[in-house]
Amino acid sequence: MPIAWARASALALLLLLAQAASDDTHIALRLDTAGLGQGEYWRLLSAHFVHLSWPHALLNAAGVLVCCALAPDVFDRRAVWRVAGLALGVGLCLWLFSPAALPYVGLSGVLYGLFVLGLAPQALRGSLHGALALLGITAWMLWQWAAGPAPSEERLIGGSIVGVAHLYGYGLAAAALLVMAGTKRWRAATHRRT
């Protein structure tokens, strides 16, 4: 799937280009209550493409490529909509339900959602690799959320890991898959009746 790799590489490159921007640009793009209070709603999306530091950006860029290796289907022609939808959803959840987590930057919440969107269908089709990868990602996310992030990780990225963003991305993707499955069943049932 060369096109999937091209899309994933473009997303990873976007993260690195955004990291190369000035500190003022990072501040203008991050998710924070003051900006949102002034109607700067682009921050709901833009915050996911800027990062705390180069190591933070590089980790998420690498995560995008790992996601493509494990679940290339998630980088199909709808990839931009998936990323935008997850970014908007995670941003809204943080703003509405976890304002204490703000200011926020980073793609990790979106990335967890992409892993779910790519790996859950594989697992449901009986793929052992997909199921094990999804289990590992789920366990890591829950461990980080319950036990808290490792201090060494936070030192590496230069700030706090916002575990609730990972939960939001994961949960939004799982909810989207459930809605899609329900819609598919409803359409099939409606088609059979006609």
Image: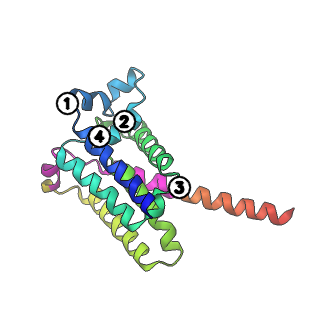
Q: Amino acid at mark 2?
A: Ser
Q: Residues within 10 Å of mark 1 (few under 14, many from 20)?
A: few
Q: Secondary structure at mark 4?
A: loop
Distance (Cα) linking label 2 and label 4: 8 Å
Farthest residue toward the top? Answer: 38
Residue that numbered label 2 is attached to:
46
Marks 1 and 3, how far apart at CA: 35 Å
Q: Which mark is residue 105?
A: 4
Residue 175: % across, % down:
53, 55
Of callouts 4 and 1, the N-terminal one: 1
> Residue at left 51%, top 78%?
126
Overall secondary structure of the magenta stretch?
helix
Q: Residue 7: x, y in percent? A: 41, 53
Up/down of 143 relative to 23, above or below: below
Q: Amino acid at mark 3?
A: Ala
The residue sitting at 54% across, 54% down in the picture is 176
Q: Which residues are magenta?
A: 153-176
Whole-number angstrom distance, CA of label 3 to CA of label 2 = 23 Å
**Residue 146 location, quadrant:** bottom left
> Is residue 172 magenta-colored?
yes
> For the residue labelled by badge 1, is the local secondary structure a helix, a strand or a loop?
helix
User: Which residue is the site of mark 1?
Assistant: 23
- Three-letter amino acid code at disc 1? Asp
Task: Say whether disc 1 or disc 3 marks the residue closer to the N-terminus.
Answer: 1
> Of marks 2 and 4, which one's residue comes earlier in the chain?
2
Q: Quadrant of the C terminus?
A: bottom right
Residue that carries the numbered disc 3 in the rendered image: 175
